[in-house]
Image (cartoon, rainbow, N blue to C red):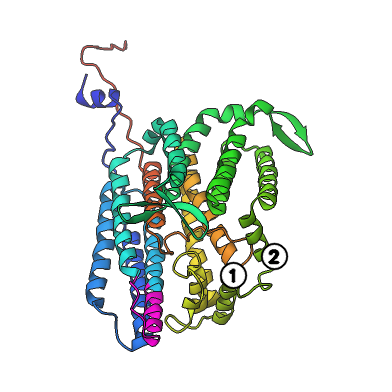
Amino acid sequence: MSATVASAASGWVPVGSARRPRRLSELVLLVLAVSIGLMAFAQVDLANGGHLPAHFAAVSAGAAAAALAAHLVVRWLAPYSDQILLPVAVAINGLGLAMIHRLDVAEAIRATANTEPLPRPTAPTQLVWTALGLLLMVGVLALVRDPRLLQRFTYTAMVVGLVLLVLPLVPGLGVTINGARIWIYVGGLSFQPAEIAKIALIVFFSGYLVVKRDALAVARTRFLGIDVPRGRDLGPILVAWLVSVAVLVFETDLGTSLLFFALFVALLYVATGRRGWVVIGVVLFSLGSTLGYYLFAHVRVRVDVWLHPFADTAGKGYQVTQSLYGLANGGVLGTGIGQGSPDLVPFAKSDFIIAAVGEELGLTGLMALLVLYAILVERGLRTALAARDDFGRLLACGLAFVMALQVFIVVGGVTNLIPLTGLTTPFLAAGGSSLVANWVVIGLLLRVSDTARRPLPAPVPITDTAMTIVVPR
């Protein structure tokens, strides 16, 4: 048997002479994405001091080098992956760094005016987390050469995800910040383990539903035109509901609870195509929300602020009203970067950074930012459609859904469309755990996309020199 046939028999087949794409579109878009962040960064100091930021040339060179290195690594490790994902993520991340720097400048100006010590800036720390996130993205591409390998760790991912969710409850490790016990302190650094848990749980949901989807798709009854699953198959969604309620009860984390449950229901619908699961999910969500409202004071406070934000503008409604005032001050075109007052909104660097963007870039800039998020979600769903295996399809769907759900929950809370939940805006808000987790999401989407778009190997003829076939004339 020839070496080629031996390779095919071992499960590895060379791609052949297929030409590797040069990824020029990604490179051009990366130049534009880096330019957006650097121009916003420069505009902050030009508007407040009339000069470029300190070390602007060095920062620009570093940002360009990091983007070029990321492009070259993706070109080497995932040459057939989507060419839009990386530039869009870089653009949002760069804009977030510029807005955090803008808030640092505002805090420094206020401290100087009040003769107070200058606060420690957040932008340099966020820049370090960005570099770490890019390295983790590269690590994902280097280690996960085939996303189907993750299916082997379905139940391991479940255990890891649940352990990460309960870590903040460990005495001496978890801490309560702003009423929610979702943080842990290790070595003087704070981290939010739920951000990593969401990725582990997506892997678990995808692997579990690939195996169990046929049983979960079976419907025995029909109610109001909807196929209702069998009673014995309701276990998974009930477990997901109970876990999400437990997160709400013990960690007072409404955002993670909502994100976790909505993600599972969405993947369940994608896997089975049964609308009955969605109906059951809505019913359970409504039941859990009602119970949470009557049983827990912090849920009642958030709902009351949502319904009556201007009833107590100096107290419980202060965050939401300041956010709405900031958005109103921005109007359609915004005050301009560095020319508004976004620092008047509490937690403007984290939970309410959308309000800062809306004030200084206006409705137009905010809509452009939401379009960038929509592009990320669309490219993720497009990757899911192109996936050649069910696990990769569900994995890409889950990663795209978690991005969409998180943006909707955050923007909805800031604009008072829904109650506040406390989640962070992907790539934009200050916070290392969220940033590195979302760069891991981009790495996984690039890997699934590369696997889906990679050309199939040419068929290899099987020959055996020891066999001779004689065809009669």
User: Could you say whether the residue bearing mark 2 is in a helix, strand or loop?
Assistant: helix
- Does residue 387 appear anywhere in the picture? no
- In which quadrant will I find the N terminus? top left
Instruction: Work out whether mark 1 precedes mark 2 in sequence or the reverse, and give the earlier one.
Output: 2
Secondary structure mostly seen in magenta is helix
Q: CA distance from mark 1 to mark 2?
A: 11 Å
Q: Judge left or right: residue 152 versus residue 471.
A: right
Q: Residue at x 34, y 69 (%)?
A: 123
Residue 111 colored magenta? yes
Which of 319/472 is in front? Answer: 319
Q: Residue at x 42, y 82 (%)?
A: 338
Number of on-image labels: 2
Q: Are marks 1 and 2 in contact (CB under 8 Å)?
A: no
The x and y percentages for residue 380 are 47, 50
Which of 267/131 is in front? Answer: 131
Q: Which mark is residue 14?
A: none
Which of 118/257 is in front? Answer: 118
Quarter residue 219 falls in: top right
- Name the residue beneath numbered marker 2: 307
Identify residue type, mark 1. Answer: Val
- Structural crowding at the residue carrying mark 2, measured as other residues with C-alpha within 10 Å and reported as few (<14), some (14–19) or many (≥20): some
Quarter residue 438 falls in: bottom left
The x and y percentages for residue 55 are 23, 77
Up-down relation of residue 192 to residue 410 (above or below): above
Identify residue type, mark 2. Answer: Leu
Q: Residue at x 56, y 31 (%)?
A: 213
User: Could you say whether the residue bearing mark 1 is in a helix, strand or loop?
Assistant: helix
- Does residue 462 appear anywhere in the picture? yes
The x and y percentages for residue 129 are 32, 59
Quarter residue 279 falls in: top right
- Name the residue beneath numbered marker 1: 320
- Structural crowding at the residue carrying mark 1, measured as other residues with C-alpha within 10 Å and reported as few (<14), some (14–19) or many (≥20): many
